[in-house]
Image (cartoon, helix red, strand yellow):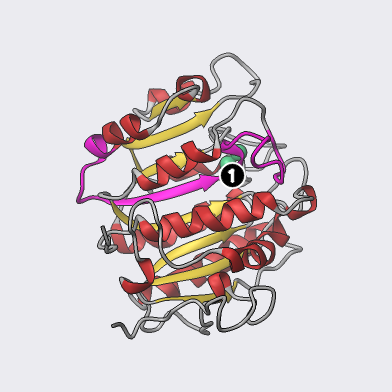
Amino acid sequence: MTNFNQPLGGNEMPRYAGPGTMFRLPSQETAAGLDIAIAGVGLDIGTSNRAGTRFGPRQIRNESVMVRPYCMATGAAPFDSFQVADVGDVALNSFNLLQSIDIIEAFFDDILAQGAKPAAVGGDHTITLPILRAIHKVHGPVAMVHVDAHADINDRMFGEKITHGTIFRRAIEEGLIDPHRMVQIGLRTTGYSAEDFDWSRDRGVRVVTAEECWYRSLAPLMDEVRDMIGPDGPTYLSFDIDGLDPSVAPGTGTPEPGGLMASQGVEIIRGCFGLNLVGCDLVEVSPPYDTSGNTSLLAANLLFEMLCSMPGCKRNS
Ligand code: MN
Ligand code: MN
């Protein structure tokens, strides 16, 4: 039926064996010929508190062995729709954050130059800034769907301009994002001041706090988000796993109680179908704090849902 890469099935090779790639897809050295390139970016030196996200890509690949190729709820068939492969990991300099940022940007420049869409697996949230810099060169300013407990709009942290808590401020300042077509979902936490989220609001970003999400389906919210962004403009999805509640995603560096349920995270991603997604990332999974592996397993499933929401993904229904 298709010449697209298929994940190695569990009836061809036991799921605990076989390749260590994401979804047991083929690996490639470059993104040549791909529609979607899955890349690991195991950065954790942009983190303010607990580290460990450097192990994220490897552990999420490990847990991804259980992800099967069809979404039974939506009928989405990403591997009948797109050529997808795992292009491996960015060769970061783990001793130098600023150099690593430049290395990441160049890596994603290469993916985009091949005409592929990047699906990045972090790594701490700092990785999103260089990815957006690369995307901006191709697409201009993007609309943004950002899931997180934190706004990540600090001006500086410990005096530093580039950290996992400053990137969306930098991205808006640099014109990488159109803030009037940006939504931040799941924000909560204790703040340094009562005005912590106002820098976003003052620039036109729609801020949806976690409390606004409690006890409800997020499908209606995503209807509004699609109306706000529209179907055509290049859009990026950045999903910080700590947007979800620590009860479902404890394996992260900056957990915050009172977060979204796993089902709400899925609703957000499914609600992105209909947007012109040009790239996505899943960040902040820290395997040393993921003692059951469930956070990484959830992350792998969320990454699969992202593939299902890429424009043009076929639905069998
Ligand atoms: Mn974040
Ligand atoms: Mn966060």
Locate residue 157 relative to residue 210 in the image: left or right: right
Residue at 61%, 82% (x, y): give it: 13
Position of residue 140 relative to residue 29, above or below, is: above
Whole-percent x, y for residue 233 in the image? 23, 50
Count of numbered circles on the image: 1
Residue at 29%, 62% (x, y): give it: 313
Classify mark 1: residues with Cα within 10 Å, few (<14), some (14-19) or many (20+): many
Front residue of 108 and 69: 69
Front residue of 176 and 29: 29
Position of residue 167 relative to residue 22, above or below, is: above
Q: Amino acid at mark 1?
A: Ile
Whole-percent x, y for residue 25 in the image? 51, 77
Q: Is residue 248 magenta?
A: yes
Locate residue 47 relative to residue 71 in the image: left or right: right
Whole-percent x, y for residue 86 in the image? 52, 75
Assign a secondary structure to mark 1: helix
Query: Dividing the image into four equal quarters, which quarter contains ligand 2?
Result: top right
Farthest residue to the top: give it.
Answer: 194
Q: Is the C-beta of the residue carrying label 1 under 8 Å from the nearest atom of ligand 2?
A: no
Quadrant location, the N terminus = bottom left
Position of residue 101 relative to residue 39, above or below, is: above
Residue 303 is at least partly visible in this image: yes
Q: Is residue 241 magenta?
A: yes
Front residue of 206 and 288: 288
Residue at 58%, 53% (x, y): give it: 299
The residue beneath circle 1 is 241
Q: Quadrant of residue 179?
A: top left
Which portion, as a residue range, is magenta? 226-255
Whole-percent x, y for residue 274 in the image? 25, 49
Residue 132 is at least partly visible in this image: no
Residue at 68%, 79% (x, y): give it: 17
Quadrant location, the C terminus = bottom left
